Image (cartoon, rainbow, N blue to C red):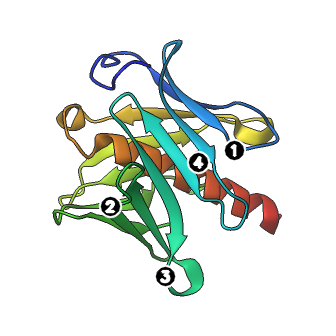
Amino acid sequence: MQTFTEARGAAWVWRRRSFWNDEADLLAGEQPIASLVPTGFWMTPRLGRTANGAWRIRYEGLFARDLTVRDAGTDAIVARYRAGWWGRGTVTFERGRTWQWRRVDVLGRQHEWQDGGGLSCVSFTRGRGLGGRTTDVRVGAHMVDDPALEPLVLLGYDLILRIARQTAVAS
């Protein structure tokens, strides 16, 4: 598996392995740089892996509105995501840095992480068609070497999958 730094300059695309489940790989060109797989049934906890580490993402808190990102090796909390209204939310890393999750378009196909100044850091665009099996990822140049990039990319795609699942249930 390539590192995110080695994949710089290539087009990044999350591709679900199957229409029937949420297992997915993040590809830079044709090379895998991350994976995200469900590890349970209830509220779908997931395990994300990159060349530099692994993180568990799962619901926590009252009414399961919060998601935590934990280091898979130590179980230490790396970040907490708090869902808001209208497709928004905030992730706070343990060192106090925050990013806002925003829906960019009216149709809900585009979402992004923004920093405190509203600058786009990582954007996600879900593919069209049956099941939307692909999601394009764009990383702002200022984020390429940021240590928070890997958890942000994994959590962002996890949120995309959860939004898609909720949309399918509601329709």
Q: Amino acid at mark 1?
A: Asp
Q: Residue furthest top?
A: 30
Whether residue 91 is situated above or below residue 147 in the rendered picture: below
- Marks 4 and 2, how far apart in space? 32 Å
User: First in sequence: mark 4 or mark 2?
Assistant: 2
Q: Residue furthest front?
A: 74
- Marks 1 and 2, how far apart in space? 25 Å
User: First in sequence: mark 1 or mark 4?
Assistant: 1
Q: Quadrant of residue 68?
A: bottom left
Assess whether mark 4 and mark 1 are in contact (beta carbons under 8 angstroms): no
Q: Amino acid at mark 2?
A: Ala
Q: Residue at x 66, y 67 (%)?
A: 43
Q: Amino acid at mark 4?
A: Arg
Residue topped by disc 4: 109
Residue topped by disc 2: 76
68 on left or right of 110:
left
Camera-nearest label, 1 or 4: 1
Q: Residue at x 38, y 59 (%)?
A: 75
Q: Nearer the viewer, residue 103 or 159?
A: 159
**Residue 102 at x, y percent in the picture:** 42, 60
Assess whether mark 4 and mark 3 are in contact (beta carbons under 8 angstroms): no
**Residue 55 at x, y percent in the picture:** 42, 49
Q: Residue at x 41, y 59 (%)?
A: 69
Q: Amino acid at mark 3?
A: Gly
- Marks 1 and 3, how far apart in space? 23 Å
- Marks 3 and 2, how far apart in space? 16 Å
Residue topped by disc 1: 22
Camera-nearest label, 3 or 4: 3
User: First in sequence: mark 3 or mark 2?
Assistant: 3
Residue topped by disc 3: 61
41 on left or right of 95:
right
User: First in sequence: mark 1 or mark 2?
Assistant: 1
